[in-house]
Amino acid sequence: MRTLEKARQVLPPPMSPKDIEMVRVAQRCIMEALDHSRAAAITLTTDTGEHPSVEVPPAALKLIGQLLGAMSEGRPIALVPSSQEFSTVEAAHFLNVSRPFVIKEIEAGRLPHRMVGTHRRVAFEDLIAYARKMRENQEAALERLAENARELGLEY
């Protein structure tokens, strides 16, 4: 089974409007706690009663807050180990590009990879770095287009 197929299998079911509101409130509370302190404690309460408070490091709270934000917006979430490697097909799906494009980028030296037999494997960390650089290049190109439009008086 492929990495992306595994990730799709663990997607949570759709949330009810009440669940979405609970997630939004929890995210706001966590993000406000992060704004005002260096560490925070979380107290879990269930139908059967309250459990002891647990201190959580700020980095973990930030991750939990981001996770809750994505959930409240209905965005899919996948946790991938940083050591995970992707095939060229999986890398193409992740980047939302074609497999030939990924291979072209690998062969041009813009996307690091390693060979496993005759197959190329791309490390997840390298894929994230490439995606970030690709996004920065796109934003810079759009900014240049906007600047050219302003210089030509084509503002709208």
Image (cartoon, rainbow, N blue to C red):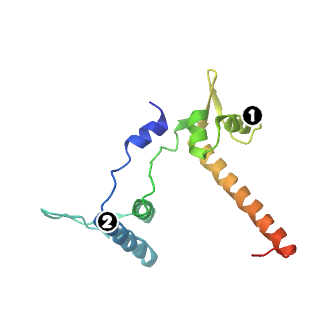
Q: Is residue 12 visible?
A: yes
What separation in Å lies between label 2 and label 1 (alpha carbons)?
47 Å
148 w.r.t. 71: above or below: below
In the foreground, 99 or 64: 99
The residue closer to the viewer here, 80 or 20, is 20
In-image side of 36 versus 121 (left or right) = left
Q: x, y (%) of residue 120?
A: 63, 29
Q: Which residue is mark 2?
A: 17
Residue 135 place in picture, x, y as percent: 67, 56
Judge whether 135 appears above or below 61 on screen.
above
Q: Quadrant of residue 61?
A: bottom left
Quadrant location, the N terminus = top left
Q: Answer with the quarter of the image where residue 119 lies.
A: top right
Q: Nearer the viewer, residue 54 or 120?
A: 120
Residue 123 visible to the viewer:
no
Tell me the residue at 43%/79% (across/down): 36
Number of marks in the image?
2
Question: What kind of residue is marked 2?
Answer: Pro
Label 2 vs 1, first from the N-terminus: 2
Residue 41 image offset from top left, x and y in percent: 32, 69
Above or below — where is 34 with respect to 13? below
Residue drawn at the location 38% of the way across and 41% of the way down: 9
Q: Amino acid at mark 1?
A: Glu
Q: Position of residue 156 (x, y in %)?
A: 75, 75
Q: Which residue is mark 1?
A: 107
Foreground pick, 112 / 89: 89
